[in-house]
Image: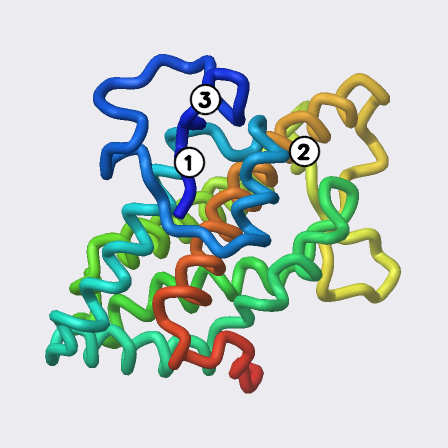
Amino acid sequence: MAHVIAKNTGGARGNLPLKGSRDGYENLILLCPNHHTEVDNDEFNFPPEKLHRLKAEHEYYVDQVFKHQTQARSMDTGALVGLMEFLPLTQMPALVNGLPARFNMDLFTVEDVLENFGKDFPHCRPFFDPHLEGHFYGFWSDLCELNNYIRTAIYNERSVYDTNNSGDFRNLYVSRDLSYEQRQEVNREVEVRLNKLATSFNGFLQFLKYNYPEVHLASFRGW
């Protein structure tokens, strides 16, 4: 058991304001010894609001396991199992690796998979689990935002991203016709969207990993 805000003011996050008792339930979180040390040694990446969110998600998972082994959870699990066969979720870091200079057009297909999932299996969307739905939708919408920029960005009536005429039919490249300043602006625009996608992707991945361990996240079988 650990304190979100330390019991003593000299401890981790101990100088932050606290409503209620330092030993009260709201200020306590269940952590193993290793994670307790990690959290206390990295106050920047583990502020109180993040610890409260992790606690809430863990409590929600425990509640799901012990109280709600229902048809609704079974349907969500079955939907995820089916989705992962067509969604290269664990390959996402590799798919975005070339950005902002190079865009892998498989990301358009990933977007199509996420969109068609709801169309082909309308009984599965939205998910019954609201936390799952939130993570799924955040990942999907951030991917759409990135892809839409790649599709629509234009300078001087020419697309920012285009093929490079080298026989590479899987990737788009930043146009060589852009000035240095324009390329720098494109880089900034893509990085903003890429960072948003990375955050939502990691949140989705970690949520699935810890809350739906029965779903094999690397079961993608190809298109």
Helix, strand or loop under label 3? loop
Of residues 129 and 36, the one drawn nearer to the viewer in this rendering = 36
Q: Is residue 10 above or below residue 73?
A: above
User: Residue 166 at x, y = what percent?
Assistant: 88, 60
Please identify the residue farthest to the bottom as the structure is shown: 221
Residue at 23 percent across and 72 percent down: it is: 65
Q: Is residue 167 left or right of residue 27?
A: right
Q: Which residue is mark 1?
A: 50
Residue at 84 percent across and 66 percent down: it is: 167
Q: Give the number of the mark in front: 3 or 2.
A: 3
Spatial CA distance of label 3 from label 2 is: 61 Å
Residue at 69 percent across and 42 percent down: it is: 161
Spatial CA distance of label 3 from label 1 is: 20 Å
Q: Check disc 2 and give the amino acid type.
A: Arg
Mark before the other along the chain sequence, 3 or 1: 3
User: Residue 210 at x, y = what percent?
Assistant: 42, 65
Of residues 185 and 140, the one drawn nearer to the viewer in this rendering = 140
Q: Which residue is mark 3?
A: 8
Q: Which label is found at residue 175?
A: none
Q: How is the image coloured?
A: rainbow
Q: Check disc 3 and give the amino acid type.
A: Asn
Q: Which residue is mark 2?
A: 158
Q: Give the number of the mark in front: 2 or 1.
A: 1
User: Residue 172 at x, y = what percent?
Assistant: 72, 52
